[in-house]
Image (cartoon, rainbow, N blue to C red):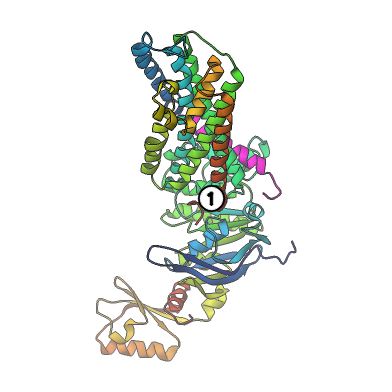
Amino acid sequence: MSDRTPAISFQNVGKTYGGAHGAVRALTDVSFDIAPGEFFGLLGPNGAGKTTLISILAGLARASSGRVLVHGHDVVDDYAAARRMLGIVPQELVFDPFFSVREALRLQGGYFGVRVDKKANDDWIDELLVNLGLADKANANMRQLSGGMKRRVLVAQALVHRPPVIVLDEPTAGVDVELRQTLWQFVARLNKEGHTVLLTTHYLEEAEALCGRLAMLKQGRVVALDRTSALLAGTASTMLRFKTDVLLPASLRGQSRVTGRIVQVTAHDAHEVERILATLREAGCAPEDLEIGRADLEDVFLEIMQGAHA
Amino acid sequence: MSAGTPLAGARTLLYKEVLRFWKVSFQTVAAPVLTAILYLLIFGHVLEDRVKVFGSIGYTSFLIPGLVMMSVLQNAFANSSSSLIQSKITGNLVFVLVAPLSHWAWFVAYVGAAVVRGIAVGFGVFIVTVWFAPFHLAQPLWVIVFALMGAAMMGALGLVAGLWAEKFDQIAAFQNFIVMPMTFLSGVFYSVGSLPGFWKAVSHLNPFFYMIDGFRHGFFGVSDVSPWTGLVVVGTSLALVCALCLHLLRIGYKIRH
């Protein structure tokens, strides 16, 4: 394969699930490439089709139309070569209760043709265990591990055959801060060493910090695809944040995000900021701890999902 | 399958499947051996002095090969079906699904492990029951052929059941309403030759009958039907079940959406 061959190429991918209540279209004509060495984020609300797309990539589901290539290998016609290049961290916290951590890793490597009796492979397993904070759990049964520890083992299992492409499907959902830090440091290091990373996450600050490029899915379609910095620059650039106990005027509710007492309102320019403040004054709403800052990825995400860029 | 190390992958999956049942061998090997001993003690005690089979063979001697083969068949089925349904329901089947394993590799590993468990349990039953009656081993090759073919067929059938089932309840139904009656009504506890004409004819439609009859022929050199007839029936049944199993694995039936 040439150096220009994408690490992952989604080509007009469609997926329809048949059911008792009629067909459900999960993906429609999804097309984009991920270059080797990229740290790529796939974002979207629940039910947008992210996991379906990852499942098609991993061979857990089959596309109804289109195709997916991993370093030029079709995931259906040449599945063995494609899967050898992929390390998948599944979203569900699954484990095999019959085995210890080391046994689980040796078996997973073995499925990919890695010989379990070679010392070099055990050295790599040891390195994974140390880097993921699992060294003292190597001989523990999987059932004895906490949820966070099981999540780390899932990451180690995905990496045990040294794949060039790592796919993380919401790896930090429901895990503590320490694991998130450990995981991101390790994955960022792998990315620097040349691994391609495809990440789906609900933590948009993670995507903003880590991903060089993003795709956003909405109802099975790609509604945004660009560099993270370009997406941030191309949207409402100003955000008013303040606290209030008063109900917002109806005219501002559509462009506001309210979390308890904290209100965030998007504004496109200084005139709009002035108009928002005037509207608040007229409504008798005195904003506390007022801040004016740049919009973040969450704002971009909400704006796109509300249809501004769809 | 593409270039690479397909054999290593299949070997690892086979090793994992064997290790899985071996780690709980008290339940998967020792318990069925104990059950077979109980059958032998109860039926042997009740019928030993009242029944002679094939002319001069004592009932306990007749019963032992039937119990051994029944254990082989039931445990081969239990291994592949329970392993697959457990992995499906707990979700850890994903580890095998994302691996570059062909449908042949899945088949060889799951059916191979089922054969290993079936033969291990059968051997255990044989070792502990052989002391209860005079020992015969007329044609050992038939013993090996029917044990291996029967275990392979039941391993493949268990794999089909595991693919089809979506909950433990369905596997239990398959086991209790299909496998168990077909095994019990196959001549484990009696000679089919002693049945009335109609039930004898019905028994001859049951492939399990040919497995047990052919296996028993290896011990005594006599049987209800020729072992060659049994070989054809069991061989054909094995080929059909294996073909169905490989087809379901190839299309990812109920495991790849």
Q: Front-most of B172 and A293?
A: B172
Residue pictured at 48% horizontal, 72% vertical: A297
- Neighbourhood count class around disc 1 (C-alpha, 10 Å): few under 14, some 14–19, many 20 upward: many
Residue pictured at 70% horizontal, 47% vertical: B4
Helix, strand or loop under label 1:
helix
Image position of B153 with respect to B5: above or below: above
Give the residue number, with chain letter if any, for mark 1: A155
Which residue type carries mark 1?
Val
For residue A45, what is the image quadrant?
bottom left
> In the image as oriented, which residue stretches furthest toward the front?
B197
**Residue B101: percent from the left, percent from the top?**
61, 47
Q: Is residue A156 visible?
A: no
Q: Is residue A269 visible?
A: yes
- Where are the magenta residues, as a range? B1-22
**Residue A93: percent from the left, percent from the top?**
44, 50
Horizontal side of B238 relative to A256 (left or right) equals right
Residue pictured at 61% horizontal, 21% vertical: B141
Magenta part mainly helix, strand or loop?
helix
Q: Front-most of B52 and B61?
A: B52
For residue B20: magenta? yes
**Residue B53: percent from the left, percent from the top?**
44, 14
Image position of A254 with respect to B122: above or below: below
For residue B60, what is the image quadrant?
top left
